[in-house]
Image (cartoon, coloured by chain):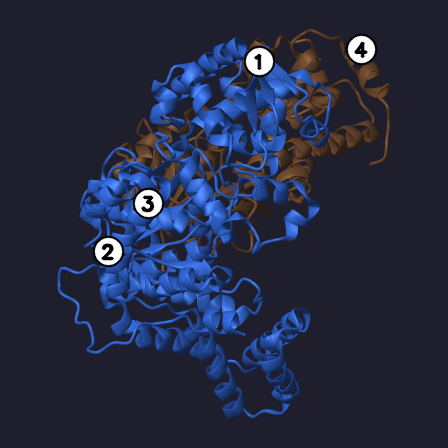
Chain colours: A blue, B brown
Amino acid sequence: MLKRFLSERPLRLPHLRPYVPRPSDPSIFWFNSERDDIVSDVVSRICSDLEADRGQLELALNDAAFHEIRRLEKQRDDEARDRLGYWRSMIRRVGKMDDTEQRRVLHSIVTNMARDVAGNFDPRVYRFARQAVPRLIGGVMEPRRLSKDLLAPAPKVLERVLRVQGDVEHLQALQSRGSLVFVPTHSSNLDSIVLAQALEISGLPPAIYGAGKNLFTNPIISFFMHNLGAYRVDRRIRVSLYKDVLKLYSQVTIERGYHTLFFPGGTRSRSGMIERHLKLGLLGSAVEAFTTNRIRRVDRPVWFVPTTINYALVLEAETLIRDWLTEEGQARYIIEDDEFSQIDRWVAFFRKVVGMRGACTIRFGKPMDPFGNEVDGSGQSMTPTGRIIDAGGYVEHRGQPVVDSARDASYTRELGEVLANRYEKETVLMSTQVVAHVLFRELVRATPGMDLFARLRLRGEISLEREEVCALLADTRLRLLELERQGRVLVSEVVREDDPSELLDRALSFWNGYHDSTAASLEGGRIVLRDPSLLLYYQNRLVPFAEDIATPEQLPAACEIEKLGAHR
Amino acid sequence: MSLRVGVLGAGGFGRALALAAARHGHEVTLWSRAPRDLPEPIRTSTDMDALGACELVFVAVPARHAIEAADQLGEVIDGRHLVVHVSRGLVGAELKTITQVVRERTVCRRIGALAGPLVADALAEGRPSGAILGTGFPEITAMVREAIGGAELRIYDTPDVIGVELASATVGFLTVVLGYVQELGAEPGTLAVLATRGMVEISRIGETLGAKESTFMGLAGLGDLIAAVAGDQRPESRLGRALALGAELGEAIGELGAYVEGFEVAQHMIEHARRNGLETPISSTFVAVSEGRMSPDDAIHALMERRVGRE
C-alpha cells in the first residue's frame, strides 16, 4: 500500500516561500511556475480535437474504458480494487451520455492522466543532487577516498568514472537560443543518471525526461526523479488518450523551450546492439513542436543531439541478454526485478569500476535540426556544403507554414533513420566489447554449422592461447582504427592506447567478480570462454562492423555475426 | 493557381514532363546543359539558379548523372522544394536509389519517384496513360497530380518509395530478357513464365533492401513490364532483340543511341543476392548468355531443368 502511495504520489518538500528563478537560472527552474499551465494546455488541445466530433469522442472514451478494464482485471491489485468500478460503470453509461456529460468525463480523464504524467522541479533537490550524487558514487567506488572527495569539487570526483566527448561548446552556445532534445542510446537504467551527470560536468543545463513508472517504486529514486523534472510513463496503460497525453506533454514542454531527454530506442537494448529501429512517437512530438512554434511565429528552434552512452561494464548485462534470448523476452517490456533494483549489485558494480580507466564514455554528437541537417554555432541549418538555409521552409506549403501531420510523420520517419545512422558513427567501442567480439568470433569459427543456442551452451569448453588472442586483438584493433579514420566508428581511449595484452587484462578484470559467472578467464596461459551469452552481449555492439574488421579467414564467422543484426 | 514547375534534364522524358506541365497551364522552367528550343511558354535555361525559384522540380537524368545533378541542384534548393525523379536506374554496387542520392547530397526531404508504364511520347502528347508515384509525403502526390495528372494521366501513389525505384530499375533488365526471347520466337506462355518468375526473383531481392513485394506486382513492376512486352518500343527491348540476333553487348548498346540502365543494375543485384543467400536463376543465366559465357540452348536447358516447386 505504502509502495503504491509513494509510486502514485511521490514526495515533495514543503515550500516555506516560493522560489523565484533568477534570469541566469536554466529554463527548467521555471518549470513549477508553468506546470499547471502546461497541464491545462495539454488537456485543452486533446479535448478540443475530440469534442468537435461526437463519434471520435465516444470512441476515445470506449477505448479508454476497454483497455483500462482489461489492464486492471489482469493486475488484480489495490489499484484494480479502487478504479475497476469506475471504468465498468463508465463503459455502461457512455452510449447514453449527452454531449455535455461526455465532454465532462473526457476532460476529467485527460486531466487526471496529464497530472499523473507531469513532473516537478525543486531547485533545492537539484542543488543537493548535483553535490551529493557524484560524492556518493565516488564513495561507493573508493571508500578510502571518501574524506578527500567530500572536500573536492563534485565534477572532479566524477571525472574518474565518466569521460565526456563531443563539441560541448557548440551545445552550450545553443542552449539559450532554443530547445535541445538529447536522444541517447539506451543500455541501462543508470543511463538517465549518468547522462544527467554528463550534462552537469559539461556545463549544460538539466533536461526534462520521461521515466518508466516502474522506476518510481523505489521511494528514494522516486523522490529524486520526481523532483528533478522527470515525467512518469506508465507503459502498462494502452489507452490511446494516454499516448496522446504523453506525446503532447513532451511537445508542449519542448515548444516552451525546456531541454528534453528521451530514449528513442524505447527500452534498454536487450541484445547490447546499437539500436536501429527507433520508436517515433516522442521524436514526432519534437518535430511537431518545431512546426507549432513556426506557425505561431515563435523563434524557438528545436535541435536534436544524438548521444551515445558507452559502458565497459553494464549493470544489468546478464538479465538483458537472457531476456533477449528467451521467447518471453520478446514480449517483456518492463523488467522490475533486474540488477537495477538490487542495491548490492549497485555497490558491486561501482566497486568494480573503481580505478578502471575508461569505464563509461558519453559522446554528444553534432546537433541537428528536426530534418537531419547540421547546424552552425548559432543554430542555423546548413546544407552539406555549408550554405545556410531556413529550416522553417520544411513546414511551408506554397510559402506558408502549415500543420500537416502526414508530412511531419514522414519527417519523423526520416529523422529516425538519420539518428540510427548517427548512432553507429558516434558509438565509442569499449575495451570489453572489442575483446568479447574477438573471442566470440573465434567461438563461431571453432563451431561451424552450429546454431546460436548450441554455441551459447559451450560454457568453458573452448579456450585459446593468450598470445593468440593478443595477436587477434592487435589485428582487429588495427582494422577498427582504419574504420575510425574513415569516420565510420569511434574507439575508446584505452582501446586506442593500450597494448593488446593490457586490453585483454582490462576486459577480463571488468568481467571477473562482477557478473555471476565471468565472460572469460585466464587459466594456465589460456583464455577460457566461460559464458558465451555474456560475450555475445558485449560483442553485439560490433555487429554492424563485423565484416569490415575480419580477415578473409574470419569472414564466414563475421558474416554469421553480422546476420545477428538482421532484426536489430 | 498555377504552379512553378522545374525540370532538370532535357532528354525525352524531361521534355515530355515540361510539355505536360505547360499544357496544364503551369509556369515551366527546363534546365539543360546546352540551350534548347521548346515551344512557348516553356522557359529554358542553362542556369541552375532558375530551378531555385520553382516549387516542384522534376529530375529527369539517367542514374549515372544523378550524383552530379543532385550536387548542382543542392546548391539552389532548400527545405521548401518538392523533388520528384523519373530515373529508372540505381547508383553503384550498393544499389543506392535516386531518392537516397538526393536525400544524402541535398537538404531536400520532400522527395518522390515517378514510375510505371508511362512513356515519354504519351506524356508529351497527352494520350491516356497511368503512373505510380512513390513518396511518403501526400503533398507531393497532390502537387504532381496538379502539375501533370488529370483525365489523360492517372497517377496512383504508394509510400513504398524504395519499392517503386527498385521495381522500376529492374523492369528495365527484365525487358531486355523478354526482348531477347521474343526475338528467338518464344511462345506467349514462355514469355509469361519468364516475366512472372523474373518479377518474383527481383521482388525477393527488393525485400532484402526494404521494398514491399506488392509494389513489384503493381504498376511499378508488372504493370510496367506488360507495357514493355506489349511493344512500347523501349530501348531495353530493342537491346534484347539485338543480342538475340548475335550482336555483342557493347556494340548493341552503342548502336541503340540511348542509355540502358537495366544491365548494370542487374549485375549489382545478382551480387547483392549472392551475399544474401538468394537464388537468381533467370538474371544470372541471362547475364551469362549476354556476356557470351553460355549458349542460348544451354540457358534454356539450365532454366527448364531446375527443380520446380510451389509458387
Label disc, if present, on residue A524 of the rendered structure: 1
Question: To which chain does the residue with label 1 belong?
Answer: A
x, y percent for residue A74: 68, 69
Give the residue type at disc 2: Gly
Q: Secondary structure at mark 2?
A: loop
**Which residue position holds label 3?**
A139
Seen in the picture, residue B233 relative to A552 is either above or below; the reply is below
Residue at 75 percent across and 23 percent down: it is B182
- CB contact under 8 Å: marks 2 and 4: no
Q: Earlier in the sequence, mark 1 or mark 3?
A: 3
Disc 2 or disc 4, which is closer to the eye? 2
> Does label 4 lie on the same chain as label 2?
no
Q: Are marks 1 and 4 in contact (CB under 8 Å)?
A: no
Label 2–label 1 contact, CB within 8 A: no
Q: Secondary structure at mark 4?
A: helix
Q: Amino acid at mark 3?
A: Gly
Q: Which mark is residue B298?
A: 4
Residue neighbourhood size for the residue with mark 2, other residues' Cα within 10 Å, grouped as few (<14), some (14–19), many (≥20)? some
Q: Nearer the viewer, residue B76 or A117?
A: A117
**Are the residues under badges 3 and 4 in a single subunit?**
no
* Residues packed near mark 3 inside 10 Å, few (<14), some (14 to 19) or many (20 plus): many
Residue B28 visible to the viewer = no
